[in-house]
Image: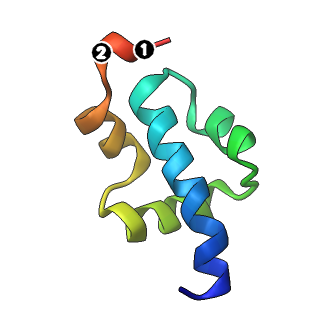
């Protein structure tokens, strides 16, 4: 795994967890995972998951886990 991918993978995984289990906005999620560029993150997320963050949340959000 290239070094940059090694650093980005945990951030994407944490974002996935937050999208599934909270109602936090994408900006709030980016702040929590330490990512400053929303546009770049959306591209990275799309490459990693095949979905944009909003689509991911719509598909995988756990109703019983919403905080």
Percent x, y of residue 38: 63, 54
Q: Where residue 39 appears, x then y in whole percent?
A: 60, 60
To which residue does mark 1 refer? 66
Q: Where is residue 4 in the image (x, y as percent from the top left)?
A: 66, 80
Q: Do the residues labelled 1 and 2 touch (CB within 8 Å)?
A: yes
Q: Which residue sits at x=51%, y=59%?
A: 42
Near mark 2 (Cα within 10 A), the count class, few <14, some 14-19 or many ≥20, is few
* Towards the viewer: 49 or 27: 49
List the single residue furthest toward the bottom.
2
Q: From this view, report whether residue 60 is shown above or below residue 55.
A: above
Q: Quadrant of residue 19?
A: top left
> In the rendered image of this protein, does residue 22 appear above or below residue 60?
above
Name the residue rendered at 56%, 25% in the picture. Answer: 24
Q: Where is residue 65 in the image (x, y as percent from the top left)?
A: 39, 16
Residues under labels 1 and 2: Cα distance?
A: 6 Å
Mark 1 Cα-neighbour bin, 10 Å: few <14, some 14–19, many ≥20: few
User: Residue 9 vs residue 17: left or right?
Assistant: right
Q: Residue 29 carries which label?
A: none
The answer to whether residue 52 is left or right of residue 40 is: left
Tag 2 secondary structure: helix
Q: What element carries label 1?
A: loop
Task: Give the side of residue 24 with respect to residue 27, left or right.
Answer: left
Left or right: 5, with 33 as reference point:
left
Q: Which image quadrant is residue 16 in?
A: top left
Residue 63's tag is: 2
**Front one among 31 and 16:** 16
Tell me which residue sits at (62%, 37%) in the image: 29
Residue displayed at 34% across by 61% down: 49
**Residue 41 vertical position relative to residue 23 in the rendered view, above or below:** below
């Amino acid at each position: 795994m290239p070094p940059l991918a090694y650093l980005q993978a945990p951030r994407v995984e944490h974002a996935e967890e937050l999208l599934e289990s909270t109602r936090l906005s994408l900006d709030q999620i980016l702040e929590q995972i330490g990512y400053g560029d929303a546009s770049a993150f959306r591209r990275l997320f799309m490459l990693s998951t095949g979905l944009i963050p909003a689509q991911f949340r719509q598909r995988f959000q756990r109703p019983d886990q919403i905080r």
